[in-house]
Image (cartoon, rainbow, N blue to C red):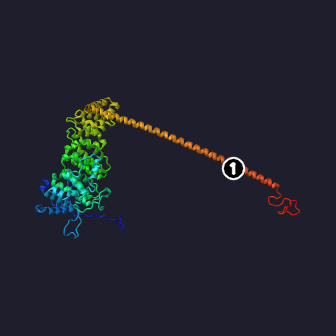
């Protein structure tokens, strides 16, 4: 029988009362069946509407020029009053306190929202009063350049000359260049902002302008793009894009966000015809930055250019694909992913309808080499009908070259068949000429080294078609490039052999020198030992001679070893001793 003690434990189930649930109506059971989700309000409602970084941000809203009456009042005021009000807007946009009678009273610090609103006021004033009056006569363009280019335009152009970019300017307007040149000699600054300050700056990046001023300048450029459109394009598109991309690597998050939004607005505003000579050179220059955020934003802007100007981007694919492909192997995962997305976006601008279905697989193969076989299978299923231009070759040739290097013969055969079919539709020899040195040597290796006859025939057919597409001059150039590469390889191998022989000879000479030194040291040591032994023998002989002399002297002496006379036994002899002497 069970007993109950002090240590006995009891388990009791807790009963929870059921809630009264209203019965479902017939309409909710038969018709819709799905309940409407409750409408979220407050922070929960706005959480999903926030734009992610890199997308188009919401337009900036003004703080002062919000009504038609305020805009009309600004328009009807005198030029001096207009200039004073614009200067106040610019000061607030750059984070300074505006001039006024209440200057001595305490005020709250400037925030990003305040600077954004002031930048929108500046843009609306520019739209109302004219770009020339605000940007030139009021000195707004000079002030923005002073904040973003504190060391002058020459430093930025010097960096672009190394990349042979000769069209880079702070804007594409000659008026802007002359104003920048005059700003160095005359003090026409709008604000009292000191570009040599060190507080709140990116000093490690060589930036001496305060972060608020740089953010405000970028916000004003963005606001001008949003409010004025193509009217302000000659003033802002160019060097300001380079500055915005450079500020994407700032240590201040607010400056980075402003720079990203400004770069997006500038790309959206720029004319498609400005892409080859102005926008793309700036993007390529910024792509060599050491800051990963700058590279990330450059890749995103290239993807944006593929949306705004697809025809121009398609013509630039032979230049852009190698640059973007190099960023696929960046150590930063953000840059890696952005490079893959950018590569897909710019390759999608290709106008060849035959290759379009296989572009995602080709881009995946470029980013992941182990996907090369799948890309070759996609291309094998492609029927080439449309002419093949340079942009199409720029997309396909890297994957085809990699396919010729695959271990399996079936993969090499697929690459040879695609090359043979593609080469028949090449438009001009100039289009395929840059890719001849990439494909011809690999095809020649397949023809020469592969043991399967069918595969050799496919490679030979592809080589013949590619040779016809290249033309005689291009073929000779490709062969010359292959021969030059082979000769360089042979020279490098010969140089390696010579270097190894010289190194071995040097080692042998060093070994002989060390042996000679050791032999010399051993000889010197033996000679020294012989001299020491001779000295020792001489000393021993001298000691023996001395002992003999002492012994002979002792024999002739009357005194013994104890100093006593040998006759009388006394130390001092008596007069009676035989050996007595006075």
Residue labelled with disc 1: 536
Vertical side of 454 occupied by 394: above or below: below
> What quarter of the picture does the N terminus occupy?
bottom left
Residue sitting farthest toward the bottom: 105
Q: Which quarter of the picture shows residue 568?
A: bottom right
Q: Secondary structure at mark 1?
A: helix
Residue 118 shows up from this direction? yes
The quadrant where residue 314 appears: top left
Front in this rendered view, residue 365 or 253 = 253
* Rendering coords of residue 380 (x, y %): 25, 36
Q: Position of residue 32 (x, y in %)?
A: 13, 53
Can residue 55 be seen here? The reply is no
Residue 422, placed above or below residue 16: above
Report whether 132 appears left or right of 192: left
Q: How many marks?
A: 1
Side of 559 relative to 415 (left or right): right
Q: Residues within 10 Å of mark 1 (few under 14, many from 20)?
A: few
Q: Position of residue 59 (x, y in %)?
A: 17, 56
**Toward which corner of the image does residue 121 lie, by quadrant?**
bottom left
| Residue with the most extreme right position | 576
Frontmost residue, 369 versus 204: 204
């Amino acid at each position: 029988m069970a007993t109950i003690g002090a240590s006995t434990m009891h388990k009791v189930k807790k009963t929870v009362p059921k809630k009264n649930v209203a019965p479902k109506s017939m309409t909710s059971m038969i018709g819709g069946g799905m309940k409407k989700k409750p409408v979220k309000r407050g922070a929960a409602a706005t959480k999903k509407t926030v734009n992610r970084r890199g997308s188009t941000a919401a337009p900036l809203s003004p703080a002062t020029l919000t009504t038609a009456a305020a805009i009309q009042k600004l328009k009807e005021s005198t030029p001096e009053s207009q200039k004073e009000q614009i200067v106040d807007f610019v000061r607030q946009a750059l984070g300074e306190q505006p001039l006024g009678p209440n200057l001595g009273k305490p005020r709250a610090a400037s925030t990003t929202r305040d600077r954004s609103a002031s930048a929108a006021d500046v843009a609306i004033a520019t739209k109302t009063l004219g770009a020339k009056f605000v940007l030139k006569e009021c000195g707004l363009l000079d002030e923005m350049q002073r904040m973003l280019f504190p060391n002058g335009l020459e430093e930025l152009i010097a960096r672009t000359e190394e990349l042979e970019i000769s069209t880079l300017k702070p804007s594409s307007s000659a008026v802007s260049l002359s104003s920048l040149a005059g700003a160095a000699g005359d003090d026409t600054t709008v604000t009292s902002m000191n570009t040599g300050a060190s507080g709140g700056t990116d000093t490690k990046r060589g930036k001496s302008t305060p972060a608020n001023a740089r953010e405000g300048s970028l916000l004003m450029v963005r606001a001008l793009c949003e409010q004025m459109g193509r009217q302000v394009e000659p003033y802002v598109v160019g060097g300001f894009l380079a500055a915005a991309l450079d500020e994407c690597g700032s240590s201040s998050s607010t400056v980075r966000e402003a720079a990203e939004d400004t770069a997006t607005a500038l790309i959206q505003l720029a004319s498609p015809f400005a892409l080859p000579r102005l926008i793309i050179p700036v993007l390529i220059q910024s792509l060599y930055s050491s800051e990963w955020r700058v590279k990330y934003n450059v890749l995103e802007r290239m993807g944006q250019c593929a949306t705004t100007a697809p025809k121009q981007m398609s013509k630039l694919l032979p230049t852009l694909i190698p640059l973007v492909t190099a960023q696929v192997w960046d150590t930063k995962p953000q840059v890696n992913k952005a490079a893959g997305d950018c590569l897909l976006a710019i390759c999608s601008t290709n106008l060849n309808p035959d290759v379009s279905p296989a572009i995602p697989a080709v881009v995946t193969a470029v980013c992941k080499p182990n996907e090369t076989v799948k890309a070759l299978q996609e291309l094998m299923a492609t029927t080439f009908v449309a002419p093949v231009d340079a942009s199409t070759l720029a997309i396909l040739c890297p994957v085809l070259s990699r396919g010729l290097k695959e271990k399996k013969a079936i993969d090499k055969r697929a690459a040879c068949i695609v090359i043979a079919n593609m080469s028949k539709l090449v438009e001009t020899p100039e289009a395929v000429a840059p890719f001849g040195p990439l494909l011809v040597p690999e095809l020649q290796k397949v023809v020469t080294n592969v043991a399967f006859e069918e595969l050799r025939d496919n490679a030979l057919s592809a080589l013949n078609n590619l040779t016809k597409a290249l033309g005689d001059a291009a073929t000779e150039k490709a062969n010359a490039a292959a021969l030059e590469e082979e000769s360089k390889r042979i020279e490098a191998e010969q140089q390696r052999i010579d270097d190894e022989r010289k190194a071995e000879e040097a080692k042998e000479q060093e070994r002989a020198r060390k042996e000679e030194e050791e032999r010399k040291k051993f000889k010197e040591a033996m000679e020294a030992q012989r001299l020491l032994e001779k000295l020792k023998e001489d000393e021993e002989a001298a000691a023996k001679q001395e002992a003999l002399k002492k012994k002979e002297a002792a024999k002739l002496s009357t005194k013994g070893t104890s100093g006593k006379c040998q006759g009388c036994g006394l130390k001092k002899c008596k007069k009676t001793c035989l050996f007595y002497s006075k």
